[in-house]
Amino acid sequence: MMDQSPAGSRIPSGAIAPSVLWKAFDVLSAFNHKERVLTLAQIARQSGLPKSTVHRVLAMLSDIGAVEPHEGGYRIGLRMFTLGALPPEAALRETALMHLEELHRYTGQTLHLAVLRGSDVVYLEKLPSRKSLPTPATVGDRLPAHCTAVGKVLLAFSGDSVAATALAGPLQRRTAKSLASSDQIRSQMETIRARGYAADREEAADGLACMAVPVMRGDRAVAAVSVAFPASAGSGQVLVTALRQAAVAISRSTAAVSTDLLTAIE
């Protein structure tokens, strides 16, 4: 059985918590795309740890290059960049990027590349709209899979056991149109399998719609690609063919890492 640490990390039940390792991850998790340089006080506030603890953890992280002093504060160090390039998801993102850029030139809309992890989708890449359409996720963010087009198409094509695990707990609603019933989502999954794509109409964010298709390896999805656009702009059906072409191209280009990605999902 597992318990939640104060910052949401999972730790073994009965363990002395939180250990220095969990504290280190709490400190690292304080950084984000909008706040790349943080002071000690900001890190303490974001992590929920005492300043004295943050100071000790930062000293250790600085010694190994995980963080670096910068302009009166701290930023993520290059050592983390090196480690971050090792997972198969990084290879997937790098190989998929040229196909995403071609699709982006065609649509002019916001594109996402995402993978399924548990009940969430994790965004590996985002190419923003030329009109700066606001979307709820940036690279590295997580959203509930059942609230997004990428998540629903991944659930539909990732196997019954994966979907069952993802839908086992209470389902978070992000908007009034988010589905909160696992039966509703399973019904949608049958439709998604039949037509090969998923739609999200203001389920992740008000005013935003998405169309998504899976990146397949055999009969299983290893990732998904979506186009986001204003919900007022129509159904998005016109985008499906271009999405499918990009997903097929990505699948062919990423065959070498697909097995590792499937293992990570299961």
Image (tube, rainbow, N blue to C red):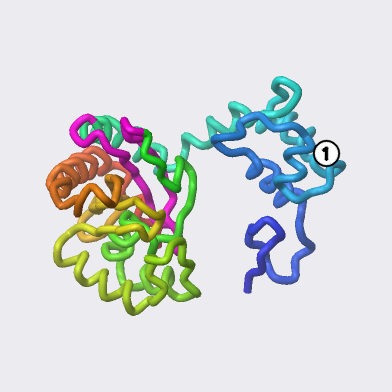
Q: Indicate yes or no whether the magenta region holds residue 130.
A: yes
| Lateral position of residue 24 relative to residue 187, left or right | right
Q: Disc 1 designates what residue?
A: 56
Which residue is farthest top?
71
Residue 101 included in the magenta stretch of the image = no
Image quadrant in which you'd find residue 37? top right
Q: Is residue 237 visible?
A: yes
Residue 129 point in image, percent of width and height: 32, 35
Give the residue type at disc 1. Arg
Q: Check the image and report above or below for 89 versus 185.
A: above
Image height check: is 72 above or below 33? above
**Residue drawn at point x = 75 percent, y = 51 percent:** 48
Question: Measuring 24% from the left and 59% from the top, which residue is drawn there?
Answer: 198
> Residue 150's x, y, as percent?
32, 54
Q: Please, what secondary structure does the residue beneath circle 1 have?
A: helix
Residue 132 as seen in the image, left or right of residue 100: right
Percent coordinates x, y for residue 88 in the rendering: 40, 43
Q: Which residue lies furthest to the front in this view?
A: 232
Which portion, as a residue range, is magenta?
A: 105-131
Q: Quadrant of residue 52?
A: top right
Image vertical order of residue 111 relative to residue 117, above or below:
above
